[in-house]
Amino acid sequence: MAEDSIVRIIGIGGAGTAVVKDVFALFPSGAEIAAVDTDTRALRESGIPKTLALTEKDCGTGGDITLAKQAADAHSRALESIAQGTKLLVLIAGLGGGTGSVIAPLVSKFAAANPDVAVLCFCIMPLSVEGGQRAALARKSFAYLSKKCAAVFELKNDVILARSDAPVSEAYAIANSNIVKAVYSLVKMLFSKGIVNVDLQTVKKIFSDSAASAFIGYGLGMGKGCVDEALEELLKSPLLKPSLKARNVLLSLVCGPSFEMNRMQYLLESASQKFGSPARVAFGAIADESFGDRIEVCAMGISEVEEPKAQPQAEEPRAEEQPSQTTAEAAISQSPAPQQNVCAAVSAPAPISSAAGKPPVLAAEERAHKRRRSFFSFKNEKDESSKKDEHAQTPISQGEFGFMELSQQRGFFGDTPPNIRNGIDLDVPTYMRRGIRIVL
Amino acid sequence: MSKSKTVAALEIGTGKMQVFLGEIVDGKMLNFVGSGQAMTAGVKKADICDVVKAAARAQAAIVEAEKSASAQIKTVCLGISGTHIKGFRNTGSANVSGADAIVRREDIERATEDARSKTLAEGRSYIHRICSGYFLDGKYCADPVGMRAEHIDVEYWMLYGDNEKISDALHVVQSFGLEVEHLVFSGIASALAVTDEKQRENGVLVVDIGCGTSDYSYVKHGRTVQAGVIPIGGDHITNDLSFGLQLSRKDSERIKIHCGKATITEDEKSQKFWKLGDQQIGDKKIPMDAINKIVRARLEELFLLLRDELDEFLIEDGIREIVLTGGTSNLNGICELASAVMELPCSKGKFASAVQPCLRYQEYATALGLLEYARREEEVASAKNTGWLGGMFSTIFKL
């Protein structure tokens, strides 16, 4: 990237590019927005001016991580440069496919090398019907990202799309809106001249503990009861646990200019109470004339880890499983100087890492020494081999998002006794109990 | 000289507190004299969960009604509902004592005593013990006195509720110094408001679909045969829409009122509505098909539960028609859906011509019915006072 930016939002792969496209459509200025993909046509059609095409083909990797790795090898410098020259890096990637699963961990690894960069990652997890292989790959990438990023938001398409039989493009667009809303709120808080501003340092502090699980929620309210309404919607978000005990919360409010101080105070008090009196609450408020009596509240943060759960192994996905590993390794070691088909946004490749120009024989030695190799264990990976072993031995304590059981889906009857008839709680929506799919 | 009495009808609803003031003249004429309304607080699913809040809102509605009528309320006819209200049928029997096998008043009293004497479990109290019919040697008889039979059965519908909940409802009124003269199940009151004598004679099921619950009352031969509560109301539809369409409660309520339909045509399926209308972030298009699926599922469930409860009366000589009332009955296509599920003709409540046009709203059915209930009670009391014959009449035919 040519100049240092405060916030950089990068969409990686097909899903990431689609989300970033929506983000870009909302606020073309402010944060630096770019997309990285192996599919050049998707990048062209996204309309995002800053893109990095990892191949020259008009198609993606088709879920082949070897292809993704080869593409990453060819553009490792450009990818490294993405992780530099910024203070807050927001990665958005769909995991389970080739590009997202390989490139996002790689960029996060580059970013982790620089302690000044905080990385937030929004991971769109594949549907379970997409197959166990995709799910396993997604879990591995997610586990890796959890180690490298300040906060990793897991967005399970299984849950977000569960109630939709909309056309695929439409359903995915709705699911993407969760990320768009969160990113929109974050960037607005940092860039807009607000009533109460939030600085980057505060955001970093909120996400200072990568061991905790991250959450996001979004609520909207109108009229006199807008505060309660927005909080109600926020807490109903499918990405929040029903009884969330937050450790740190970043609350952002966008409201009309006439929004009263006492209501703002009420919002803060209620939110704090509803999130279980978190240790740290950061609050940003922006007045927007177009909002009238409408308010938008976005909550992001990390929650207390309630109970240890069996975690997938945190090590990077194993390369030896890939039949084309040797070719890939060769590609790494034989790759000449980084290619320059990088977009305008990624114009100035960062200095070459110390391991960039090592001969093939070294790569072979590395392989012999390493207990495990990943499909994105690139040139400078060996420098971190000892660290990686430590990581492999340390169980990750990051929790997973929990989702409401059917019996808990009682909405505003939640504080009333169950309405049992013939063994069924009638307060739970009928369409849910009957399994009726709602197309939005 | 005519004798008049001002009566206040109070409905503690989940959505609103409604007060109607009526002047009863000689127990016969009922004049509407004022009204008051307040948004409800502290009531969920028709159960009072915060007495203080509920009492404050009820008081606001009563004060407004008093102002509008320039009258002071002393006693209240209180409508009660809630998920705690349940009922059962109980039959009392007696052998006809006379050697001539002619049914006398004493025989009926013994059978009645037998039917009414069933004790409830601790913590429960009767709200109504309603005589739903007499049977002489197993055959229905509207007026058994003087008829020839060996055995008389009297059926009672016993409607009861939790002491605590009933006490809360009474406390709402008593907390500001008023007395509850009549405690009436809302479903029974609504049936009085939206049906005529002929319908009640032929057999009509009145379902008052309110915010929190649906109160039903099946009336045949002019008597309430069965009444009860299905714990599903308009709030459930709103809640379902809120989940299904991922909207706030307020938006769901608006969508329900303006776009909600229980039955739709093929053409309507493709219609879409904007959630907020400003088409900015957060706004989205909502398809009518999705709204309908959610609303229909909930209402279908309501009518299926009703069908289960009243299964024994869904026969040729049972329920002849269904009348829907209450705020949620304003939903488009609800009668068609009820008719399809229950396989009976269904219509919305119709008010008597004497009811002022400005009061002919389904939401007011309970409050209007409470006034009519009070009038009938007053009429019975007046009859009692006018002579021994009147007294006997009212004892037997008291609702």
Image (cartoon, grey):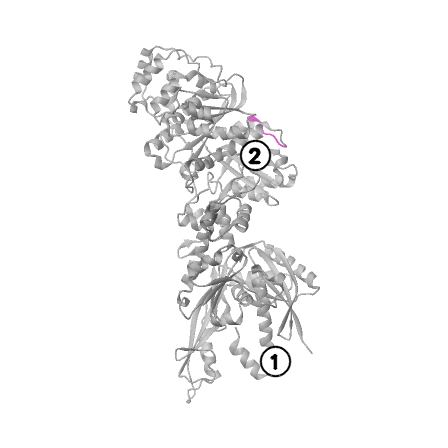
Disc 2 is placed on an element classified as strand
| Residue A103 left/right relative to B250 | left
Is residue A148 in sight in this rendering?
A: no
Residue located farthest toward the right when viewing the structure as drawn: B70
What amino acid type is highlighted by mark number 2? Answer: Ser
**Front residue of A289 and B123:** A289
Label 1 marks which chain's residue?
B
Percent position of residue A265, x then y: 62, 39
> Could you tell whether B19 is left or right of A78 in the image?
right
Q: Position of residue A195 (x, y in %)?
A: 63, 32
Q: Which residue is mark 1?
A: B385
Residue A216 % position (x, y): 49, 35
Task: Mark yes or no: residue A126 visible.
Answer: yes
Residue A168: name its quadrant: top left
What segment carries the magenta color? A195-200
Say what secondary structure mark 1 lies in: helix
Question: For residue A62: magenta?
Answer: no
According to the picture, the residue beneath numbered tag 2 turns out to be A252
Residue name at image x 58 percent, y 67 percent: B352
Are the residues under marks 1 and 2 on the same chain? no
Q: Is residue A125 above or below residue A274?
A: above
**Residue flagged by tag 1: what amino acid is it?**
Asn
Instruction: Work out which residue is located at the far front of the displayed protein and give it.
Output: B267
